Amino acid sequence: MAYKKPVIILLSTDTLHHRYFIKYLEDKNINFFKYIFETSSIKPKFVTGPFYEEEEYKFELKKFFSRFSKKLNNKKLINVTNINSKKSLKILKKIKPDIGIVFGCRKISKEIIDSFSLNVLNIHRGIIKKYRGLDSDLWAIINDDFNNIGTCIHQVNEQLDSGPILMEKKIKLKKKMKIFHLRYFTTLLAAKMFYSLFKKKFFKKNLGIKQKKIGNYFSFMPLKKKFLAKQKFDMYINLFKQ
C-alpha cells in the first residue's frame, strides 16, 4: 500500500525563528500545507521590554538565513487575528488536516485541537518537566538552572504544556555565548528534532511518554528580572575557560 503523506498545518506567528523552522523543513522536503499566523498576542499588565530584541533580530537574521531565503510561499500563508478565531476554525474544517504543529502562538482551544484527525504537537522552547508556559529559558537562568535550557516536542491537550512528550533535548552552553543567542540555538534543536520525528513516521494517535509530574507554570518575565537573568547568564558564561 502506498504511503500517504499527512496534511500538516503550522499554527504560529511571523518571526525570524519561525520562518527558519519552515524553511529548514521545506529544504528537507517536509512541506506544510498552510502556515496560519496569528497577528495579535496576549499582553501582560507589566513592563517586559524592550530587552535585547534588536540584538536578537540582527543575530538571527545573519545566522538563520545565510543559506536559506527568509521569503515564504505566500500561497500557503494565512493571517488571522487570533489562532482560536472562527476564521481559523472554518479554514481547518475545510482543509481537514492530519497534523498540527504549534510553535509560538497562544494556547489553542479544544475546537482547534479537534480539527486535526491525528495529532497536534507543540514545540516548546524549554524543558516542560520544569518550566511550562513562557520565557522558559529565562526562568531557568533566574533559578540558576543552566542545565535545563532546551527544547521539547509534546502532544497538545487542553492543559497547557502537559501532554505526552515525544522528544526533549537540552542545549550545551559555550563560552562567548550571549543571552540573545538562546532562541537561535533552541530553534535549531526544534527543527532537527521535528525532522527526526517526521522520518520515523510519527503519524498515529497516542504518541509520546506521559508526563509523570506536570512542571511549574511560568508567565511573562518582568523586565527587571530579565536584566537580572542577563547578569546571571553573563556571569555563568564568564566561568568558562577563555
Image: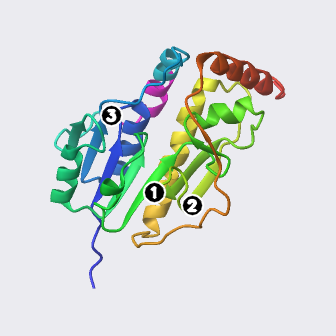
Q: Which residue is mark 2?
A: 165
SS for callout 1: loop
Amino acid marked by disc 2: Ile
Q: Earlier in the sequence, mark 1 or mark 2?
A: 1
Q: Which mark is residue 69?
A: 3
Real-space Cα separation, disc 1 to disc 3, in angstroms: 30 Å
SS for callout 3: loop
Q: Which residue is mark 1?
A: 156
Real-space Cα separation, disc 1 to disc 2, in angstroms: 10 Å
- Residue range in magenta is 59-70
Q: Quadrant of the N terminus?
A: bottom left
Residue occupying image coordinates x 26% and y 61%: 97
In the image, residue 214 lies in the stretch drawn in magenta? no
Residue occupying image coordinates x 22% and y 51%: 89
Q: Nearer the viewer, mark 3 or mark 2?
A: 2
Residue occupying image coordinates x 26% and y 80%: 2
Q: Earlier in the sequence, mark 1 or mark 3?
A: 3
10 Å neighbourhood of mark 1: few (<14), some, or many (≥20)?
Answer: many
SS for callout 2: strand
Q: In this rendered view, identify the residue nearer to me: 108 or 20.
A: 108
Residue 138 locus on image (x, y percent): 64, 31
